[in-house]
Image (spheres, rainbow, N blue to C red):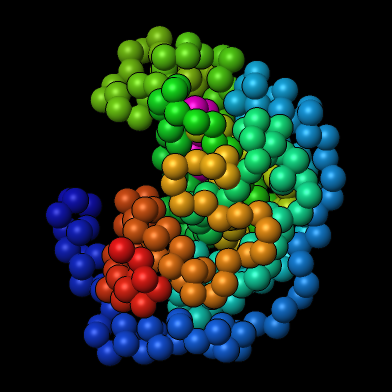
Amino acid sequence: MDRSVFEELLDESRLADDEVARRFEEAIEPGYWDSLRKPTGDARVTTVEVDAIGLELAQQGWFMRERVLDPLPLRQAVNAVRAAGWPPVFAFVYEELWTFLRAPLFRALGRAFLGAEPAQAAYFWAHVVPAAAEGRGWAPHADGDDPAAPPRLNLWIPLTDATLDNGCIYVVPRDRIPPDWVRTFNSRAAFDRDAVLTLLQSSRAVPAPAGSLLGWDFRTIHWGSVRHASAGEPRMSIAVELIAADSDEETIALGEPPDFRRRIALIAGAMRVYGRWEPRLVRFAALRDRLADWAGVS
């Protein structure tokens, strides 16, 4: 489809003013979100060997451990907001989406990788790859390409099984490619044939059962594959980031979860940041801006 035609269709899909007003009133009322689902408890987190993970991150830029937490409470939260017509990221209104990251494991993992007291970054997302032929994850990219930037750790948790058929994560282990390729990957218009062959042969599929923990630093090339089978349930996951608590940007302490108003502010901010990856979010742009104003986001 021609890009301009696609953009016109997106513009036509924007919420009408009366629906923006209705959804705004719902969104700022905690009781509304409570009415959408019954709490099922925290996502219990197990313990894993942090030193071994640190070594893998240093050598390859990524790691994966199977079945680290109970995905059911998180999956039910995402399903509840989707069933009510909200973007999946609104699942972060719920306590369960914040408390799991405050388990001792993540503080230890953050300290080991960052070399500093960790905090949660104000960047998070809920991914849903639909059970349809056009379903796909985000395109190949590195989250950051500046080798001098402070370290960051992206954590990705599948809430349903991520398989070869439904579009699991792929990574390019960093010890398989020249260091400068990451620095230029996001901005390159093209790669020569040898580079393409190396990237293809170095890539690794990472199928993972629900509740697993995947992580990579910001200089690791990765992506979510296209679905190769339209049957089955949507692939569902969440992503959060850890950074140093004394970073020169907004952070969320790994103590008490943020209060409701700040959660709304953070959700509105996430929608603004990740809109380029999720163009259909333009439908909710007016609502996003109104919620940002209500929450006091500049």
In which quadrant is the C terminus drawn?
A: bottom left
Left or right: where does residue 229 sit relative to residue 248? right
User: Which of the 4 image quarters holds residue 217?
Assistant: top right
- Judging depth in this view, the residue of 142 and 172 nearest the camera is 142
Q: Is residue 77 above or below residue 25?
A: above
What residue do we see at 58% from left, 50% from top?
120
The answer to whether 100 appears left or right of 2 in the picture is right
Please say if 206 is above or below 229. above
Residue 178 counted in the magenta span: no
| Residue drawn where x is 56% and y is 14% of the image | 176
Number of numbered markers: 0
Dominant secondary structure (helix, strand or loop) of the stretch shown in magenta: strand
Location of residue 201 with respect to 144 vertically, above or below: above
137 above or below 230? Answer: above
Q: Is residue 129 left or right of residue 99?
A: left
Choose top left, top right, bottom left or bottom right for residue 267.
Answer: bottom left
Q: Residue furthest front?
A: 246
In-front residue for pair 185/110: 110
The percent coordinates of residue 107 (x first, y second) are: 72, 45
Q: Position of residue 97 (x, y in %)?
A: 63, 64
Picture residue at 60% right of the left edge, 48% below the top:
119
Was residue 220 drawn as part of the magenta stretch in this picture?
yes
Query: Percent position (x, y) of residue 210?
Result: 72, 53
> Magenta segment, which residues?
219-224
Residue at the image position 83 percent from the left and 35 percent from the top: 49
Quadrant in the picture for residue 292: bottom left
Q: Can residue 42 be seen by looking at this rendering?
A: yes
Q: Position of residue 124 (x, y in %)?
A: 51, 54
